[in-house]
Amino acid sequence: MTKAKLETEVSKYMSYVLRHAPEAAGLTLDPEGWVSFEALEQAVASKYDVSRADIIEIVENNPKKRFTVADNRIRANQGHSVDVDLALTAVEPPAALFHGTSAIAWHSIEREGLKNAAPPRASVGRCRNGENRGYAPQGRICHPARRRGRHVFRGSFFLCLRQWSMAHRKRSSSIYFARRRDPMKSAVVQLPGLNRDRDMIAALTKISGREPMTIWQTEAEIPDVDLIVIPGGFSYGDYLRCGAIAARMPVMQAIIDKAAKGVKVLGVCNGFQILVEAGLLPGALMRNASLKFVCREIKLEVVNAETDFTRAYAQGQVIRCPVAHHDGNYFADEATLAKIEGNGQVVFRYAEGTNPNGSLNDIAAVMNEKGNVLGMMPHPENLIEAAHGGSDGRGLFASALDVIAA
């Protein structure tokens, strides 16, 4: 691994444990987000071959200035999903609103104004008095903006933008300031026999702050959402093949249509089997090599940390995760296996000899070529908080729900 790549991975790992899951590294943040430098150094050194001097260099050279070191302590400067008080100072918003856009789109914006769309991706957290804070999307000035209301902005001009086209047309050409961007919308599919839907709903609600909608099997259309999840269980009693009947329900055609448009889709355990049966993912899931139902904790290696589902993790990071299945033995022919390995479609791999089912190449999770559909046998929703015994699964949802800084 090159020095640059190592520094990037260490920086990502530090961001993850200092902003989202300190307990994953055995750390405890104080109320202001600080932790002793020695404790962080030990956590990093247990995973990467780096010295104290290397970590200091990574902090000083970080282009986004994500960390602060003071009095032998270190903390992340922004983007926390855990509850900390950064004591940020209230500031007045600027007279002009900056919005990231491409040069290609600029003339259309000048001509037609901003249209209704997803708000810019930004890091969201809480300040001492409950105000939201984060950082502003960077880009060229796309519209002069007039301040509406008496909102207080904290941090480095956290400007979250609601692009209400009707408001532009009917009221004025000004852009409204919003105190925070809306949490991403998600949906959980419900089918007869699935039994992990409540766990999944709880995980999505806890991490995004917004309860997902539930979609029944007979729905032929799905409202606009950012993430669709098919949870685990035993749909239709696993008759014929696991997921075979569920894959032919009306809701699956709606999911196929959404996936084709780029909506993120996550299938866990039986959900993974359903996605394979529906043709959204390659390969097949067969009976466990032991011919027994397996329910235990395993280790997962993050094989591809550059996906919409794994950005909160570092490449090669090993995490804990529970499994509970009878038919999780991933199989694909040689050509398909070579293709998905070569394309980076293998996202997680069973690590440290914990393969519970005999999957080829220790494959635990695969995604489609476009990168917006992920299937995995382990259950990350059951390891997201201290009450579960750890939070290693939290990073997957933080990534998919975009509650981490890119």
Image: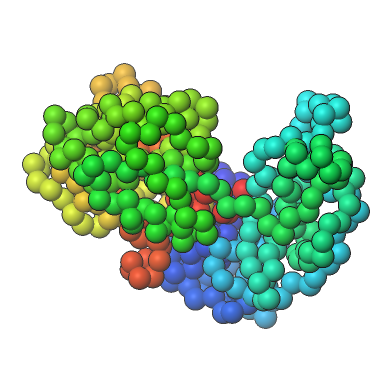
**Residue at (39, 41) in percent of width and height:** 215
The part of the image, by quadrant, that contains residue 348 is top left
Residue at screen point 39% across, 54% down: 201
Q: Is residue 228 left or right of residue 208?
A: left
Q: In the image, is 403 to the left or to the right of 336?
A: right
- Asked whether 145 or 297 is in front, the reply is 145
> Which residue, as the protein is rendered here, is positioned at the far top?
335
> Which x, y percent locates residue 1?
51, 44
Residue 274 higher or lower than 13, as above or below? above
Q: State the residue lying farthest toward the left.
A: 291
Tell me which colouring the rendered structure shows.
Answer: rainbow
In this image, 134 relative to 328: left or right? right
Could you say which is closer to the camera, residue 405 or residue 39? 405
The total of numbered circles placed on residues is 0
Measured along the vertical axis of the image, is residue 34 above or below residue 171? below
Q: Is residue 106 visible?
A: no
